[in-house]
Image (cartoon, grey):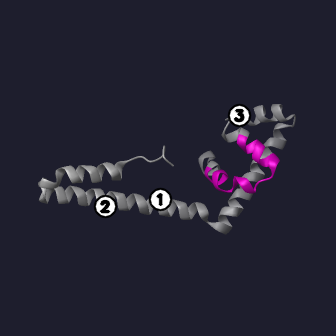
Amino acid sequence: MTKLEFMRLWDIYGGLLTPTQREMTDMYFNLDLTVSEIAEQKGVSRQAVSECLAGCKKQLESYENTVHFLKILKGRSLSFSKKVENALSWADDFFALHPEYAADIAVLKQILNCDNDQEI
């Protein structure tokens, strides 16, 4: 499992970890600390941190294998992206047939291309 995959599972299921597991994974992901740095700050061995992170990965994978929430989210995200792509293609085709609607099509394309991350 890559660090990105681990982080995605942590974003979804991290609340199910113990407080200690959450703290160490938070230090690993959000503070971007190394295993050695976490061990030093927590006053434990590097092995203890490594085992904690490995246990967290295993536990998060187990949750995903049971619930499949990440798989569902990925599927919906891909499905939504395909719908936006199809709508943009339709807008281009419609504009070719009806250039008099250029302003309306431009508004539609702006809406479809809008990045709503700030609002979310």
Chief SS of the magenta region: helix
Q: Residues within 10 Å of mark 3 (few under 14, many from 20)?
A: some
Residue at 22 percent of width and 53 percent of height:
104
Position in image of residue 116 (x %, y %): 44, 48
Circles 2 and 1: CB atoms closer than 8 Å: no
For label 1, the residue is 77
Circles 1 and 3: CB atoms closer than 8 Å: no
Q: Which residues are magenta?
A: 8-26
Q: Amino acid at mark 3?
A: Leu
Q: Is residue 94 magenta?
A: no
Side of 36 relative to 71 (left or right): right
**Mark 2 to mark 1 CA distance (whole Å):** 14 Å
For label 3, the residue is 33
Residue at 65 percent of width and 62 percent of height:
64
Q: Nearer the viewer, mark 1 or mark 3?
A: 1
Side of 62 relative to 81 (left or right): right
